[in-house]
Image (cartoon, grey):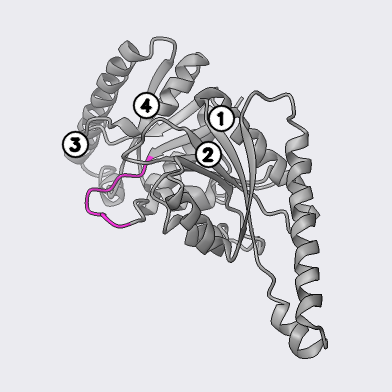
């Protein structure tokens, strides 16, 4: 179950905003575990010096203690509102995204939930570097909450049905999306964006008439619609309202536009680059879309993905 144990990175000195509450409602309904984590960063030099100075060691200890107490206070306040959740807290020293991924592995979290709000960012992308690193390098689903989260009523689920090889991953994405829709009562909109780069090629080199190219395009579109229907056919008994939407154009352009025009509350999508090259763990299309989406985003990886952060252990 995707919501059995949530890891929430928080800043202990700041109040918890509304961004977390939609997912905490789900966790409460499932009597789930929630671990609050705070990472104290930029203290690597102090950690080294602490081997030679008891004062520095004491300072590190005091900083950790203060952060731990602040997290405990957050947990106590949340417990009043969400009595069915079992809360715990963790304080780590180091680089935030690395420590978050390691901690998630240690406590066997099922999802990482992070508030995307950055007060110094007013444009579309509200996702800081820690969120981006987590989306690239964590094997767990990442729920990136909008700072202006309203009740989730519509969820757009972006899938790539261009290749049958993506079917297993698409099924994983859809399964998680249906789970979220079930808990929130949201409508699911299964999205696929497509365009054919071969149109001009056919016209120039293949001696195809416009009518021929249009027929080929129509056949491709119908085939992709059928693949989307096949995905949903596995869930005909689901109470979730479902619809299929085909968008024509590049995904990185037409999907964010659709999300904005329809006031979609959440987008769920995969983020693994097809190259599979270390350092390029999030595809260019997903990266570009994240630059334009202001709603909450839930990203996930295929089952075969392994975090490069954990390879350092």
Q: Which residues are magenta?
A: 115-123
Where disc 4 sits, the SS reads: helix
Q: Which residue is mark 3?
A: 59
Residue, x 46% and y 47% (percent of image)?
262
Q: Position of residue 35 (x, y in %)?
A: 42, 25
Question: Counting other residues with Cα less than 10 Å from the Cα at mark 1, is it few (<14), some (14-19), or many (20 or more)?
Answer: many
Where disc 2 sits, the SS reads: strand
Numbered badge on residue 181 = 1
Q: Is residue 159 above or below residue 16?
A: below
Q: Which residue is mark 2?
A: 155
Q: Which residue is mark 4?
A: 21
Question: Counting other residues with Cα less than 10 Å from the Cα at mark 2, is it few (<14), some (14-19), or many (20 or more)?
Answer: many
Q: Which quadrant holds residue 233? A: top right
Mark found first going from the N terminus, 2 or 4:
4
Task: For marks 3 and 2, give the CA distance.
Answer: 46 Å
Q: Nearer the viewer, residue 200 or 14?
A: 200
């Amino acid at each position: 179950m995707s919501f059995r144990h949530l890891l929430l990175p928080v800043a202990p000195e700041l109040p918890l905003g509304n961004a977390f509450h939609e997912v905490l409602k789900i966790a409460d309904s499932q009597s789930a575990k929630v671990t609050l984590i705070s990472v104290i960063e930029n203290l690597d030099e102090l950690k080294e010096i602490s081997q030679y100075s008891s004062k520095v060691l004491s300072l590190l200890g005091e900083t950790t203690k203060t952060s731990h107490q602040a997290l405990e206070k957050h947990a106590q306040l949340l417990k009043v509102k969400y009595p069915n959740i079992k809360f715990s807290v963790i304080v780590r020293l180091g680089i935030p995204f690395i420590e978050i991924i390691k901690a998630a592995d240690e406590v066997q979290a099922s999802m990482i939930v992070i508030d995307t709000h950055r007060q110094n960012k007013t444009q579309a992308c509200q996702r800081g570097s820690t969120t981006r690193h987590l989306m690239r390098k964590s094997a767990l689903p990442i729920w990136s909450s909008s700072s202006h989260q309203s009740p989730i009523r519509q969820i757009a689920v972006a899938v790539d049905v261009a290749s049958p090889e993506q079917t297993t991953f698409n099924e994983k994405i859809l399964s998680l999306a249906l789970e979220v829709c079930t808990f929130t009562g949201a409508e699911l909109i299964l999205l696929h964006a497509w365009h054919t780069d071969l149109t001009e090629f056919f016209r120039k080199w293949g001696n195809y008439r416009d009518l021929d190219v249009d027929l080929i395009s129509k056949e491709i579109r119908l085939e992709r619609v059928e693949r989307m229907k096949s995905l949903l056919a596995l869930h005909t008994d689901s109470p979730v309202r479902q619809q299929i939407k085909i968008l024509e154009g590049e995904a990185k352009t037409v999907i964010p536009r659709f999300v904005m025009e329809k006031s979609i509350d959440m987008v769920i999508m995969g983020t693994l680059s097809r190259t599979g090259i270390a350092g390029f763990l999030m595809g260019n299309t997903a990266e570009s879309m994240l630059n334009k989406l202001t709603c909450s985003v839930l990203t996930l990886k295929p089952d075969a993905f392994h975090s490069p952060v954990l390879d350092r252990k």
